[in-house]
Image (cartoon, grey):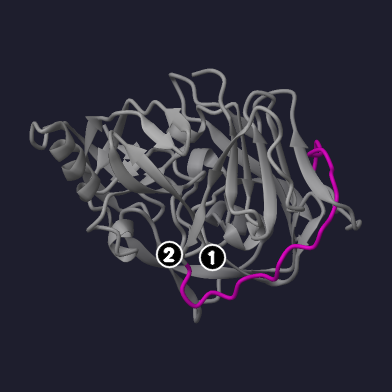
Amino acid sequence: MGIFALPLLVLLAGAEPLPSLDERVVVPPPARPIVIKPVLLESVAVVAEEPRYVAPTRLDQIGRIWAPVTVNGRGPFRLVLATGASNTAVTPHLAEELGVQADPSHTVMLRGSTGSVAVPVVPVESLEIGDFLMQPGRLAVIPDALGGADGVLGMDALANKRIQIDFRHDRVTIMRSKNQRAASGFTIIPVSMLHGLLVVDAVMGGVPVKAIIDTGGQVTLGNQALRTALAARRGDGVQDGKLDQVFGSTLDMQVGTRLATPALALGTLQVRSPSMTFADFEIFKHWKMTEEPAMLIGMDVIGLLDALVIDYRRQELQVKLSRM
């Protein structure tokens, strides 16, 4: 049976990114579409009585992080919060619902975990998260998105922000980072930025590994260099495992090998990761990350946390984990 690693990474060469978000307001998601008039405030918070916007990983499903977004004054629509996506993008269904037409003379390159494809772009007049406002521009149209969402909310919307994700209480808050220190009970994990991505110097089974935090990816993926290094550390050779079909955001498929893995150390935090899928996926090749151990940490691991704060200004993760 295949597994999906959507949307993982969206790299849009030659795209026209929207300007940075203005600081705006906190509003609960409305019951029906409305036009929101921007008011200059501090943050946007998403709260729901049921797991509509953020849910922890369970045995029978993979958690997700959805943000309600208003496009051209309509919505809100659900976009996957994707720290591994360089640009915000929409699905064909949302483009059709908005009544916007793709420009046949303008395409951008979408790069996913398993391949790349040229995709069209559509014009938008505005994009609002609560009352964070993005001005007119173009958005790529992606083939699909995680869990039936309407697109992905990428790095162009998240830069210089502080994102607080509370899995236990179904709450997401996005605000401008004010250099806040971690609250009591949170573990600090430093990150570095690589191609706009959040990268942690982690250790798995005694093997140092570059770990990319991807809240948009369903599953955790490792490259072949990590698989080989883990086998050498065990001293028992490269093990056989279950073959998996992995589908990326371009809907291309690659075959990987799913294997049991040791615990993952992120700073002082130990996260149990019972298994992951290994292959030299196309996205590792694009990043030139095939020679040294590397991995993409998806929601199958991230969703095990109680709470996660991503502070782009401080370049750190603030993590709370009490269930493991």
**Measured along the vertical axis of the image, is residue 133 above or below residue 199?**
below
226 sits to left or right of 24: left
Q: Over which residues does the magenta segment extend?
A: 12-32
User: How many angstroms separate mark 1 from mark 2 (CA)?
Assistant: 8 Å
Q: Residue at x 75, y 38 (%)?
A: 46
Q: In the rendered image, which residue does mark 2 sit on? A: 110
Q: Residue at x 39, y 43 (%)?
A: 202
Question: What is the three-letter code of the residue carrying label 2?
Answer: Leu
Quarter of the figure with residue 126: bottom right
Q: Main secondary structure of the magenta part?
A: loop
Disc 1 + disc 2, Cβ < 8 Å: yes
SS of the residue under disc 2: strand
**Residue 76 in the image: x percent, y percent?**
73, 46
Regarding residue 4, the answer to whether it shows in the image is no
Question: What is the three-letter code of the residue carrying label 1?
Answer: Ala
Q: In the rendered image, which residue does mark 1 sit on? A: 140
SS of the residue under disc 1: strand
16 sits to left or right of 223: right
Q: Residue at x 52, y 62 (%)?
A: 86
311 sits to left or right of 34: left
| N-term-proximal mark, 1 vs 2 | 2
Magenta segment: does it hold 21? yes
Outermost residue on the left side: it is 237
